[in-house]
Amino acid sequence: MESKTKSLQQVRNKVASAHKDCSPAEKLQFYDQWATQYEEDVFVLNYKAPHLAAAALASVCNINCDSKLVLDVACGTGLVAEELQRFGFTLFHGLDGSAGMLEVAKNKQLYQELKLCMLGQDSLPFDSDKYDAVIIVGALSDGQVPVSVVLELLRVTKPGGLVCLTTRSNVSNLMYKANLEEVMSDMESKGHWEQISVQEVEQWEKAVSEKEVSSKSDYIPGVIYIYRKKLRPLT
Ligand SMILES: C[S@@+](CC[C@H](N)C(=O)[O-])C[C@H]1O[C@@H](n2cnc3c(N)ncnc32)[C@H](O)[C@@H]1O
């Protein structure tokens, strides 16, 4: 009998096309047509980022999680909110640039509010100082969401609130990662937020390109950063 599960190679071919150079609008079109297959495919890649990021956020926010309002930026199909729910979080707003991905998320009935938003082009469609926690997983990488969005993540976070960000540490994303770290560290020097933790993860997800596979592992690494917004930023 033919197996319904896709092979790693089939998924690699599919996802590699998500990483190719294209305009932001084309990238979002790609996600639109991938939406209904996304979760099945990232399962084959053993994509651990949503679980790991949710666990990291929960570990620094371990009381009254059920009353914390979380903004899930680039929420996709809602994997991050599903994981956060396992840790006791219940209040979620989400946004994404792909209507197709948002449709899948909406059907899970996890989010109280979902909005379509092109990151890097539009401001986040939310008031300043609104969220207890803001999380972005799987979207801060080369060719996806520009590093400059970090300032918007900070803006919508409540003073004293948490921001959880992830990126990949594979070779093709190292330049982006360095830029991201420069911006985040500059914001810390200016007194906007303080770093709470950095967690390097060896096995983030299986590599989609043969070039990223080493003799030691067929996984690529990733990293989770957590910051706390200062109660009174320096002026
Ligand atoms: C790899 S998925 C991650 C989704 C979810 N956070 C997860 O971890 O499963 C990347 C998401 O970022 C969204 N995205 C990519 N570029 C974007 C942009 N410029 N503006 C808004 N959303 C974007 C895509 O639509 C997609 O849903």
Image (cartoon, helix red, strand yellow):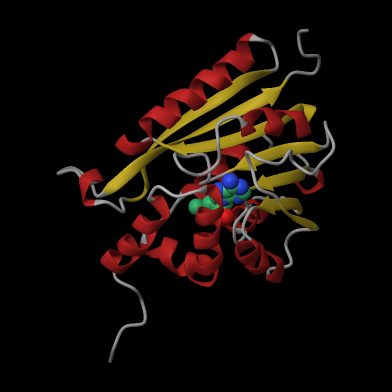
Q: Residue at x 76, y 29 (%)?
A: 155
Locate residue 106: give its quadrant: bottom right
Left or right for 22, reference 202 = right
Q: Residue at x 39, y 28 (%)?
A: 175
Instruction: Tell which residue pokes out farthest to the bottom in this image.
Output: 1
Query: Which residue occupies the foreground of this view, 85 or 148?
Result: 148
Is 69 rendered above or below residue 39?
above
Left or right for 118, reference 15 = right
Query: Which residue occupies the foreground of this view, 25 or 218?
Result: 25
Q: Residue at x 63, y 68 (%)?
A: 104
Q: How many marks?
A: 0
Expressed as whole percent of the image width and height from the top left, the position of residue 90 reads: 75, 54
| Residue 60 seen in the figure | no
Tell me the quarter of the image containing the N terminus. Answer: bottom left
Query: Which residue occupies the foreground of this view, 114 or 86?
Result: 114
Instruction: Tell which residue pokes out farthest to the left in this image.
Output: 215
Expressed as whole percent of the image width and height from the top left, the position of residue 48 reads: 45, 51
Expressed as whole percent of the image width and height from the top left, the position of residue 69 reads: 79, 44
Left or right for 54, reference 235 = left
Locate residue 194: give its quadrant: top right
Expressed as whole percent of the image width and height from the top left, the position of residue 233 reads: 77, 13
Tell me the quarter of the image containing the C terminus. Answer: top right
| Residue 173 seen in the figure | yes
Query: Which residue occupies the foreground of this view, 194 or 126?
Result: 126
Q: Residue at x 26, y 65 (%)?
A: 9
Is 160 rendered above or below residue 153?
above
Left or right for 51, reference 222 = right
